[in-house]
């Protein structure tokens, strides 16, 4: 079995960050990413790339980080208690895109690699990542194409891979206090180290490199659609769910804050504008009601009758 090679993973992640930024700039057609590098006192650092006030994207951030530490943080040992007391090395690319147009979904993606070390013991390593879609208005074509792209990415790795990681995504991006999913899901995987480093790395690369293939067609279809202020206000209201999830439940946010990561980069995932409204209830038989009634519930989108 091949031993993990962190250097080749890092090289891929840096190239992925660059290629995604290039693709998003082409989709936006106006704004460009500004890069800012940072260092972490405990070890490591990263580069944050942020696009703001674009023609299509209100804000998009694509972060690369590579950090080290003497002890695993609480968020990691709660998930993997057997790693307590080990030093760690973690690297990844994480992105969040908040479009201007409420008919274009918000999206999030990340791919990551962890190694936990202990003197006299073999390193414990794994890959994780995925991508998910958070629409504000119900366009079935977008949701089906998104999940079809996810299924196509998984297909070479086994027929059980997409259903497994799709289900995991539905369960992970769930807000218990709202009893609803954050969006319509996608893929989520973690603790991936079987069947060995090379195959696991291949899958992580397929997910990372496949993200824009899944998202770009949705942007292209919807970016010229006209919207009104009511629809914009609903988008801002629903963005509140995104904030709630990231600050309360998201492992990546907790890991970054607990390991002394750069706060500005960690909270780059927050939308630039958001609002809350007490006791909001969508109008009956409206598109907003359809979002709640049909789209914020896990289901097999590739088996729907269309």
Image (tube, rainbow, N blue to C red):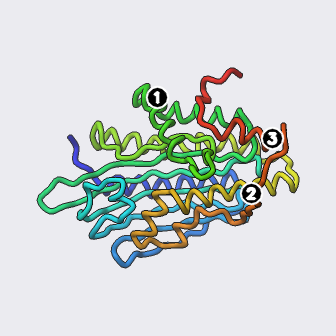
Report how far apart the C-alphas of labels 2 and 1 lie in the structure: 36 Å
- Mark 1 neighbour class, 10 Å CA radius: few under 14, some 14 to 19, many 20 or more: few
Q: Residue furthest left?
A: 120
Which comes before the other along the chain, label 1 or label 3?
1
Residue sitting at x 60%, y 65%? 50
Which residue, given by chain and number where applicable, does mark 3 sit on?
287
Which residue is located at x 55 percent, y 40 percent?
186
Residue nearer the viewer, 198 or 87 = 87
Earlier sequence position, callout 2 versus callout 1: 1
Q: Secondary structure at mark 3?
A: helix
Q: Nearer the viewer, mark 1 or mark 3?
A: 3
Residue in the picture at 75% in, 44% down: 137
The one nearer the camera, 242 or 156, is: 242
Q: Quadrant of the C terminus?
A: top right
Rendering coords of residue 200 (x, y %):
34, 41
Element at badge 2? helix
Instruction: Tell me the residue that label 2 is attached to.
Output: 237
Q: Is residue 113 visible?
A: yes
Q: Quadrant of residue 84?
A: bottom left
Q: Are marks 3 and 2 in contact (CB under 8 Å)?
A: no
The alpha-carbon separation of the residues under discs 3 and 2 comes to 15 Å
Task: Give the structural element (helix, strand or loop) at label 1.
Answer: helix
Whether residue 100 appears in this view of the structure is no
Sequence order check, earlier mark of 3 and 2: 2
Question: x%, y% of residue 220?
Answer: 72, 43
- The residue at which mark 1 appears reads as 155
Task: Give the farthest residue toward the top.
Answer: 305
**C-alpha separation, residue under disc 1 versus residue under disc 3:** 33 Å
Q: Please give left or right for residue 116 compared with residue 297 in the image.
A: left
User: Residue 301's quadrant in the figure?
Assistant: top right
- Callout 3 crowding tier (Cα within 10 Å): few <14, some 14–19, many ≥20: some
The percent coordinates of residue 281 (x first, y second) are 79, 49
């Amino acid at each position: 079995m091949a031993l993990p090679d962190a250097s080749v993973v890092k090289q891929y992640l840096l190239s992925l960050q660059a290629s995604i930024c290039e693709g998003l700039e082409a989709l936006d057609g106006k704004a460009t990413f500004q890069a800012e590098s940072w260092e972490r006192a405990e070890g490591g650092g990263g580069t944050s790339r942020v696009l703001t006030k674009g023609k299509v994207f209100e804000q998009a951030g694509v972060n690369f980080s590579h950090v080290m530490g003497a002890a695993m943080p609480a968020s990691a040992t709660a998930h993997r208690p057997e790693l307590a007391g080990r030093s760690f090395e973690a690297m990844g690319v994480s992105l969040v895109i908040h479009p201007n147009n409420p008919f274009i979904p918000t999206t999030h993606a990340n791919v990551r690699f962890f190694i936990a070390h202990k003197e006299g013991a073999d390193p414990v390593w794994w890959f994780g990542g995925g991508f998910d879609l958070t629409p504000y208005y119900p366009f079935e074509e977008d949701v089906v194409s998104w999940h079809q792209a996810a299924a196509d990415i998984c297909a070479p790795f086994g027929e059980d891979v997409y259903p497994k990681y799709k289900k995991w995504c539905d369960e992970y991006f769930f807000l218990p206090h709202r009893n609803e999913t954050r969006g319509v899901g996608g893929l989520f995987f973690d603790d991936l180290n079987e069947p060995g480093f090379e195959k696991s790395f291949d899958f992580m690369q397929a997910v990372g490199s496949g993200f824009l293939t899944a998202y770009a067609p949705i942007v292209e279809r919807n970016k010229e659609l006209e919207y009104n202020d009511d629809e914009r206000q609903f988008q801002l209201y629903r963005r509140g769910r995104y904030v709630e999830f990231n600050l309360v439940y998201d492992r990546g946010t907790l890991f970054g804050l607990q390991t002394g990561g750069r706060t500005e980069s960690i909270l780059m995932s927050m939308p630039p504008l958001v609002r809350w409204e007490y006791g909001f209830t969508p109008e009956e038989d409206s598109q907003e009601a359809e979002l709640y009634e049909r789209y914020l519930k896990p289901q097999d989108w590739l088996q729907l009758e269309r």
